[in-house]
Image (tube, rainbow, N blue to C red):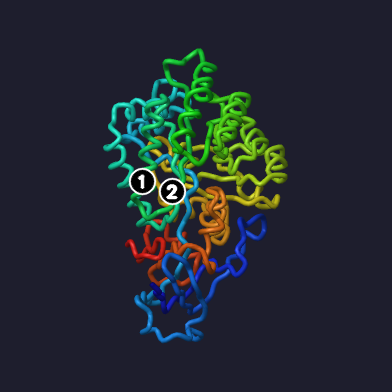
Amino acid sequence: MQKVIINIKKLVQVEENPALKVCGELMASVNCVENAYLIISEDKIQEFGLMSDLNKEISTFEEIIDANGGFVYPSFCDSHTHLVYAGSREIEYVDKIKGLSYEEIAKKGGGILNSAKLLNNTSEDELYIQAKKRIDEIISQGTGAVEIKSGYGLTLDAELKMLRVIKRLKADCPIIIKSTFLGAHSVPLEYKGRQAGYVNLVVEEMIPKVADQKLADYIDVFCDKGFFTVEETDKILKQGIKYGLTPKIHANELDFSGGVQVGVKNKALSVDHLEYVGENEISSLKNSDTMPTILPGAALFLNLPYAPARKMISAGLPVAVASDFNPGSSPSGNMKLMMSLAMINHKMTAQEVLNATTINTAYAMGISQKVGSIAKGKIANLFITEKMTNIEFFPYSYGSNLIKTVILKGEIVK
């Protein structure tokens, strides 16, 4: 089936020769076509160009979508979320406002351990219902691909339960979903004082079971102060690789943890958070294929230092921007808002945050050859905006939705 989008004021982030990622100073450039059309065939982008060059009679298309002067963007890709969780943690939000740190809340049994307790007492069906609602919300906000982590189970059965929920979401939702096993998210209370025992559980029991049931694409570790050491992280990642899981890393959120270097050493697809990044981390990343990913929502919510995006871009690195959607440190999956926060707090330009939330996050999910830009043959994951003046207006108006129509895999879903 062929359909056409007509009267597009600006077709944003067009690629004739698609790149897998955008690095350094190239992040400041976004190619656009003014007064454009776009043809979709089945679930793929077939053709695009100037409205004045549309050779086929519009009436011959099976479906005509009038953008009415709006912009057409590639859908966001959100490469770091924890959106399968049970309930919320707003009381901890109050604790943060009162001055307790992330680590202090965790020591009280809050944080990740609180979410683990809630999740263990919640059925798989209820988890699915809650997560499906969040998926529907982020679709309406322009996200067309999302990575979802486990990590709120911290037992073999509960981690598998989370991953089964993600598998069900993959099957039922129009959005592209990648699954990450994050058994090493925190150390359960019953393993307090014997962390090595929990690491062995992750390595010897959890990873083989996850792989055997084909429940995850990636493996992740929270390598940071107060959580897992570089040595423990290396051990877990190597076991994941042995079982066919590609590494991703929570790194340097709370301190200079060595997480970036151990991620690069193990050829991690991405290293995420990066509030603490110096010359050693930048040097390590420059000689790698690993995507540095910043999470502006978490830094804002936890009142952390802001990851030095400008420093990384100036060094020639690519930068991705993801939401970290989770109940404790970033209770939002709104990628348009993440664009705005990255501009305001990380001093990125509108063009840089657009590349950072689409093509570079697609790379951080291993799917940039399929989505993340407007290119012939890519999956037609798009959204149409209200009328706007320019691409700067989209993140500038951080409190307004502005998304009028959402198209996923060639079909209108909103």
Crowding at dot 2, Cα within 10 Å, few <14 / some 14-19 / many 20+, comes out as many
Q: Are marks 1 and 2 in contact (CB under 8 Å)?
A: yes
Which quadrant, please, contains the N terminus?
bottom left
Q: Quadrant of residue 24?
A: bottom right
User: Residue visible at 37% across and 63% down?
Assistant: 406
Q: Quadrant of residue 409?
A: bottom left
- The amino acid type of the residue labelled 2 equals Ile
Please state the horizontal and vertical placement of residue 387, each as a whole percent of the image. Answer: 40, 72
Of callouts 1 and 2, the N-terminal one: 1
Above/below status of 128 relative to 53: above
Q: CA distance from mark 1 to mark 2?
A: 8 Å
Q: Secondary structure at mark 2?
A: strand
User: Residue visible at 46% across and 42% down?
Assistant: 179
Above/below status of 75 relative to 364: below
Seen as rendered, the residue at the extreme top is 193
> Could one spot residue 138 in this view of the protein?
yes
> Could one spot residue 248 in this view of the protein?
no
Please state the horizontal and vertical placement of residue 218, each as a whole percent of the image. Answer: 52, 39
Q: Secondary structure at mark 1?
A: helix
Number of the label disc, if any, that sits on residue 177: 2
The residue identified by callout 1 is: 169
